[in-house]
Image (spheres, rainbow, N blue to C red):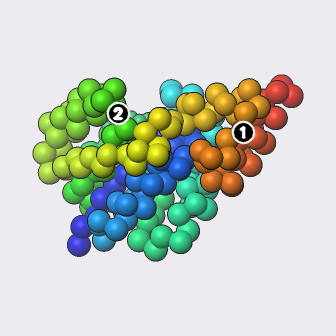
């Protein structure tokens, strides 16, 4: 039984992430989407909010589970009995960071392999950071994120403007 982890910040989940989740869920028996709980990264959404949005947009995928984690990814992989980490590669600019992370993880946990999926070309430009910036300036994010995420982002931005 192949168990894999797709880790990330998912602040918030975009159609690019969802594409990787869907394609990975076909390749493995069980996919754990690991949501990083690290306030040092100053996420816009709490880990609970990010988990809830992910649960919502993956509810039709029966072998996908959303689990928050903190600490080292390799420790989380061991705890979840997962031998594979999946990451998406959008462009060459992602490569250096991803290579370094995968090699570091391999040193820390030689039993954990990283597999890269190239992002669907339709989403190769997309990032959570860009989506948040567009939303902050009142731009339309319909084509970048699922409706539930759009609603949550707009609600969050309105609340921020009130502060
Ligand atoms: O969506 P992101 O922010 O690119 O995801 C990054 C993530 C969560 C995969 C990475 O920051 C991570 O694995 N953090 C856990 C800490 C860790 O294991 N660090 C050592 C590997 S570099």
> Could you say where residue 64 lies in the image, as x and y percent from the top left?
43, 66
To which residue does mark 2 refer?
91
Which label was assigned to residue 140?
A: 1
Which label was assigned to residue 39?
A: none
> Could you say where residue 158 lies in the image, as x and y percent from the top left?
82, 35
Q: Is residue 114 above or below residue 94?
A: below
Q: Secondary structure at mark 2?
A: loop
User: Position of 114 compared to 129: left or right?
Assistant: left
Is ligand 1 within 8 Å of the beta carbon of the residue shown at mark 2? Answer: no
> Could you say where residue 47 lies in the image, as x and y percent from the top left?
57, 45
State the quadrant of the C terminus.
Answer: top right
Q: Is residue 55 above or below residue 1?
A: above
Quick one: label 2, few (<14), some, or many (20+) residues within 10 Å? few
Closer-to-camera residue (125/81): 125
**What residue sits 23% from the left and 47% below the top?**
114
Residue reaching furthest to the right? 162
**What residue sits 73% from the left and 33% below the top?**
139
Closer-to-camera residue (115/66): 115
User: Position of 138 compared to 68: left or right?
Assistant: right
Rendering quadrant holding ligand 1: top left
Quick one: label 1, few (<14), some, or many (20+) residues within 10 Å? few
Mark earlier in primary sequence (2, 1): 2
Q: Secondary structure at mark 1?
A: loop
Using the rendered view, name the quadrant where residue 27 is placed. Answer: bottom left
Q: CA distance from mark 2 to mark 1?
A: 24 Å
Q: Could one spot residue 152 in this view of the protein?
A: yes
Q: Could one spot residue 75 in this view of the protein?
A: no
Is ligand 1 within 8 Å of the beta carbon of the residue shown at mark 1? Answer: no
> Could you say where residue 57 lies in the image, as x and y percent from the top left?
58, 60
State the quadrant of the N terminus.
Answer: bottom left
Give yes or no for contact between labels 2 and 1 (Cβ–Cβ under 8 Å).
no
């Amino acid at each position: 039984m192949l168990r894999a982890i797709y880790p990330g910040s998912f602040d918030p989940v975009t159609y690019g992430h969802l594409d990787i989740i869907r394609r990975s869920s076909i390749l493995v028996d069980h996919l754990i989407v690991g949501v990083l709980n690290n306030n040092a990264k100053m996420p816009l959404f709490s880990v609970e909010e990010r988990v809830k949005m992910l649960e919502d947009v993956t509810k039709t995928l029966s072998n996908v589970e959303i689990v928050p984690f903190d600490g080292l990814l390799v420790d989380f992989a061991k705890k979840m009995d997962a031998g594979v980490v999946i990451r998406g590669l959008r462009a060459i600019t992602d490569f250096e960071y991803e290579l370094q992370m995968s090699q570091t993880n391999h040193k820390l946990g030689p039993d954990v392999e990283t597999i890269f999926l190239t992002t669907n070309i339709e989403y190769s430009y997309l990032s959570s950071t860009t989506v948040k910036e567009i939303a902050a300036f009142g731009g339309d994010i319909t084509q970048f994120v699922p409706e539930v995420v759009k609603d949550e982002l707009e609600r969050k931005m309105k609340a921020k403007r009130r502060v």
